[in-house]
Image (cartoon, helix red, strand yellow):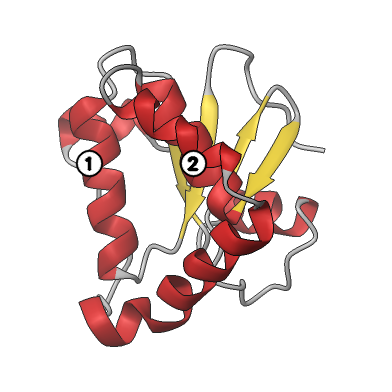
Amino acid sequence: MIKVMKQYAVVVFDGECSFCNGWIDFLLRFDRKEVFRFAARQSETGAAFASQSGLPPGGTGSIIVVEDQRIRLRSDAVLRMLTLLGLPFSVLGIFRLVPAALRDFVYDVIARNRKRWFGKTIQCRVPAPSELHRFI
Protein backbone atom coordinates (compact mmCIF):
# COMPACT_ATOMS: atom_id res chain seq x y z
CA MET A 1 0.00 0.00 0.00
CA ILE A 2 1.31 3.43 -0.93
CA LYS A 3 1.72 5.64 2.12
CA VAL A 4 0.46 9.22 2.01
CA MET A 5 1.92 11.73 4.42
CA LYS A 6 -0.82 12.82 6.84
CA GLN A 7 -0.77 16.48 5.93
CA TYR A 8 -1.39 15.83 2.22
CA ALA A 9 -4.32 14.62 0.17
CA VAL A 10 -3.24 12.98 -3.07
CA VAL A 11 -5.42 13.65 -6.11
CA VAL A 12 -5.14 11.07 -8.89
CA PHE A 13 -6.52 12.44 -12.15
CA ASP A 14 -6.66 11.64 -15.85
CA GLY A 15 -3.67 13.50 -17.25
CA GLU A 16 -5.02 13.28 -20.82
CA CYS A 17 -8.37 14.92 -20.04
CA SER A 18 -8.69 18.67 -20.59
CA PHE A 19 -11.50 18.95 -18.00
CA CYS A 20 -9.41 17.09 -15.40
CA ASN A 21 -6.37 19.26 -16.10
CA GLY A 22 -8.55 22.34 -15.70
CA TRP A 23 -9.69 20.99 -12.33
CA ILE A 24 -6.06 20.52 -11.27
CA ASP A 25 -5.30 24.10 -12.35
CA PHE A 26 -8.24 25.25 -10.21
CA LEU A 27 -6.95 23.31 -7.19
CA LEU A 28 -3.42 24.65 -7.64
CA ARG A 29 -4.75 28.19 -7.82
CA PHE A 30 -6.92 28.03 -4.71
CA ASP A 31 -5.01 25.56 -2.51
CA ARG A 32 -3.25 28.23 -0.47
CA LYS A 33 -2.22 25.76 2.28
CA GLU A 34 -0.78 23.31 -0.27
CA VAL A 35 -2.70 20.34 1.14
CA PHE A 36 -2.90 18.62 -2.26
CA ARG A 37 -0.34 16.55 -4.11
CA PHE A 38 -1.12 15.32 -7.60
CA ALA A 39 -0.48 12.23 -9.70
CA ALA A 40 -1.70 11.61 -13.23
CA ARG A 41 -3.39 8.22 -13.52
CA GLN A 42 -1.07 7.50 -16.44
CA SER A 43 2.02 7.86 -14.21
CA GLU A 44 3.50 4.96 -12.27
CA THR A 45 2.40 6.50 -8.96
CA GLY A 46 -1.08 7.33 -10.24
CA ALA A 47 -1.52 3.82 -11.63
CA ALA A 48 -0.49 2.35 -8.26
CA PHE A 49 -3.07 4.49 -6.43
CA ALA A 50 -5.76 3.53 -8.98
CA SER A 51 -4.92 -0.15 -8.60
CA GLN A 52 -4.95 0.17 -4.81
CA SER A 53 -8.41 1.75 -5.12
CA GLY A 54 -9.66 -1.28 -7.02
CA LEU A 55 -10.02 0.54 -10.32
CA PRO A 56 -9.19 -1.23 -13.60
CA PRO A 57 -5.84 -0.35 -15.23
CA GLY A 58 -7.47 1.88 -17.88
CA GLY A 59 -9.38 3.80 -15.22
CA THR A 60 -13.07 4.46 -14.99
CA GLY A 61 -13.22 8.21 -15.33
CA SER A 62 -13.18 8.63 -11.56
CA ILE A 63 -10.99 11.10 -9.78
CA ILE A 64 -9.37 9.63 -6.68
CA VAL A 65 -8.51 11.38 -3.42
CA VAL A 66 -6.31 9.53 -0.95
CA GLU A 67 -6.03 11.05 2.50
CA ASP A 68 -4.94 9.38 5.73
CA GLN A 69 -5.12 6.01 3.92
CA ARG A 70 -8.79 6.66 3.09
CA ILE A 71 -9.77 6.49 -0.56
CA ARG A 72 -12.59 8.63 -1.95
CA LEU A 73 -14.02 8.35 -5.45
CA ARG A 74 -16.46 10.22 -7.65
CA SER A 75 -18.66 12.84 -5.98
CA ASP A 76 -17.23 12.06 -2.52
CA ALA A 77 -13.76 12.90 -3.85
CA VAL A 78 -14.93 16.19 -5.38
CA LEU A 79 -16.75 17.26 -2.22
CA ARG A 80 -13.71 16.38 -0.08
CA MET A 81 -11.44 18.49 -2.30
CA LEU A 82 -13.81 21.45 -2.04
CA THR A 83 -13.93 21.03 1.74
CA LEU A 84 -10.14 20.96 2.00
CA LEU A 85 -9.91 24.19 0.00
CA GLY A 86 -11.77 26.00 2.78
CA LEU A 87 -14.11 28.94 2.39
CA PRO A 88 -15.87 29.80 0.17
CA PHE A 89 -15.58 26.41 -1.59
CA SER A 90 -16.22 24.32 1.51
CA VAL A 91 -19.78 25.66 1.61
CA LEU A 92 -20.49 23.31 -1.31
CA GLY A 93 -20.05 20.45 1.15
CA ILE A 94 -23.77 20.94 1.76
CA PHE A 95 -24.24 18.65 -1.25
CA ARG A 96 -23.32 15.74 1.05
CA LEU A 97 -26.97 15.95 2.08
CA VAL A 98 -27.90 14.82 -1.43
CA PRO A 99 -27.97 11.01 -1.60
CA ALA A 100 -24.68 9.61 -2.94
CA ALA A 101 -26.49 7.67 -5.67
CA LEU A 102 -27.88 10.92 -7.14
CA ARG A 103 -24.57 12.80 -6.75
CA ASP A 104 -22.67 9.94 -8.38
CA PHE A 105 -25.20 9.74 -11.23
CA VAL A 106 -24.48 13.39 -12.09
CA TYR A 107 -20.74 12.77 -11.65
CA ASP A 108 -20.89 9.74 -13.98
CA VAL A 109 -22.72 11.69 -16.71
CA ILE A 110 -19.98 14.33 -16.64
CA ALA A 111 -17.21 11.69 -16.44
CA ARG A 112 -18.58 9.75 -19.41
CA ASN A 113 -18.81 12.85 -21.59
CA ARG A 114 -15.87 14.95 -20.33
CA LYS A 115 -13.50 14.22 -23.21
CA ARG A 116 -16.20 14.78 -25.82
CA TRP A 117 -17.37 18.03 -24.20
CA PHE A 118 -14.01 19.46 -23.09
CA GLY A 119 -11.48 17.66 -25.29
CA LYS A 120 -8.50 15.43 -24.79
CA THR A 121 -4.87 16.44 -24.58
CA ILE A 122 -2.17 14.70 -26.58
CA GLN A 123 0.03 14.22 -23.54
CA CYS A 124 -0.24 14.36 -19.76
CA ARG A 125 -0.04 17.73 -18.04
CA VAL A 126 3.51 18.96 -17.49
CA PRO A 127 3.79 20.92 -14.24
CA ALA A 128 5.38 24.36 -14.27
CA PRO A 129 8.70 24.56 -12.40
CA SER A 130 6.94 26.31 -9.49
CA GLU A 131 4.47 23.38 -9.25
CA LEU A 132 6.92 20.46 -9.44
CA HIS A 133 6.97 19.89 -5.67
CA ARG A 134 3.21 19.30 -5.78
CA PHE A 135 3.36 16.36 -8.25
CA ILE A 136 4.38 12.87 -7.21
Q: Is residue 101 visible?
A: yes
Rate crowding at label 2 as few (under 14), some (14 to 19) or many (20 or more) other CA atoms within 10 Å.
Answer: few
Q: Is residue 119 visible?
A: no
Q: Secondary structure at mark 1?
A: helix
Residue 31 is situated, as x and y percent measured from the top left of the image, at 29, 23
Work out whether mark 1 precedes mark 2 in sequence or the reverse, and give the earlier one. 1
Residue 84 is situated, as x and y percent measured from the top left of the image, at 44, 22
**Residue at label 2?**
95
The residue located at (30%, 46%) in the rendering is 24
Rate crowding at label 1 as few (under 14), some (14 to 19) or many (20 or more) other CA atoms within 10 Å.
Answer: few
Which residue ends up furthest to the bottom in the rendered image?
Answer: 116
Q: Secondary structure at mark 2?
A: helix
Amino acid identity at mark 2:
Phe
Number of numbered discs overlaid on the protein picture: 2
Quarter-wise, where is residue 101 in the image?
bottom right
**Residue at label 1?**
26
